[in-house]
Image (cartoon, rainbow, N blue to C red):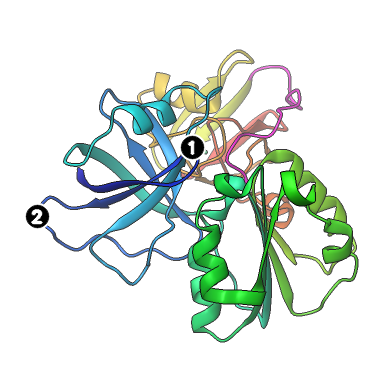
Amino acid sequence: MLVVRNKEAVAEGVVSLTLARPDGGRLPDWAPGSHIDLILPGGVTRQYSLCGDRWDAHAYRVAVLREPDGRGGSAQVHDRLAVGDLVGVGGPRNNFPQVPSHGFLFIAGGIGITPLLPMIHQAELLGADWQLLYGGRTRASMAFADDLARAHGERVHLVPEDEYGLLDLASWLGRAVPDRKVYCCGPAPLLAAVEQHCAHWPAHSLRTERFTASELTAPVHQTPFEVELRRTGRTVTVTPDISVLQALRGAGVDLLSSCEQGTCGTCLTTVLDGVPDHRDSVLADHQRAANDCMFPCVSRSRGDRLVLDL
Ligand code: FES
């Protein structure tokens, strides 16, 4: 359990939490792009990107947007969580690692700025050439915008929609730049637009992180399939009405999970044989093609049988 050391409003509808061990001890290390599971009083679990200083071993910082149409987790953080409260924390885990590059273009939409903050810090430390394109509804809703502009001047391009309209992705991404990685986090329409505009960039130039699950299409395999658990020597049957995770749990296999929507990466499992029907929002295309891992909370099997390293 960690204790809430500080809670402050950092933009309209956004609060930041600073979390620490009650005894002030060291926390596990993390790298830019990491997130933690926040297990709120009452058991609600949500994932938030770490947006503080990775070199501060004694505090984690997250920023939480109030989501009026959400499932209640953000409202609980905004309305009820107080300084001194204890929260459970899982992770950190990193599905959005920052790879070395001479240059970076960071594209944030709204609260999507959070995983990019430590990446910007890292890019500065490494002397990389970087720019930030940051869009939001209004200037007042854009967390950390003023700090970023003050600290980094012309590298930071703030685009409040009510002043300038939508991000001009065609100008920013029209010309592919070798040795530049594009990191984007924000709402699904922004990610889709950036993916489209980066289609002609060299492979693996673009990295994205989703906060919400992609729309799930119908599973490839519509009939029951078998999952062999190689290490335990058991086989379970997955019927169309349950997930692989549920089938595993039904057979007494205790696999750690959190979001159960294919977005957090917690239930990552090694695939030894068979071809998964990847339905998560975590893996990049080349990682899917390797077919050596899957997320059993949403992903299924393309064939009659999968073999997992469980
Ligand atoms: Fe989050 Fe499976 S539990 S990806």
Q: Residue at x 53, y 24 (%)?
A: 68
* Magenta range: 210-224
Is residue 310 something one can see in this rendering? no
Q: Residue at x 16, y 41 (%)?
A: 84
**Residue 225 pos. (x, y %):** 63, 23
**In front: mark 2 or mark 1?**
1
Secondary element type, mark 1: loop
Residue in the foreground of this view, choosing between 201 and 74: 74
Q: Amino acid at mark 1?
A: Gly
Residue in the foreground of this view, choosing between 114 and 9: 9
Q: Residue at x 76, y 27 (%)?
A: 220
**Residue 113 pos. (x, y %):** 56, 54
State left or right for residue 258 relative to residue 148: left
Residue that lies at the very extreme toward the bottom in this rendered image? 127
Classify 127 as above or below 70. below
Residue that lies at the very extreme toward the top in this rendered image? 241
Secondary element type, mark 2: loop
Q: Which residue is mark 2?
A: 23
Q: Which residue is mark 1?
A: 13
Q: In the image, is residue 202 part of the stretch drawn in magenta? A: no
Q: Which mark is residue 263?
A: none
Q: Amino acid at mark 2?
A: Asp
State left or right for residue 13 relative to residue 199: left
Does mark 1 have its CB less than 8 Å from ligand 1? no
Q: In the image, is residue 217 part of the stretch drawn in magenta? A: yes
Can you say which quadrant of the picture contains the C terminus?
Answer: top left
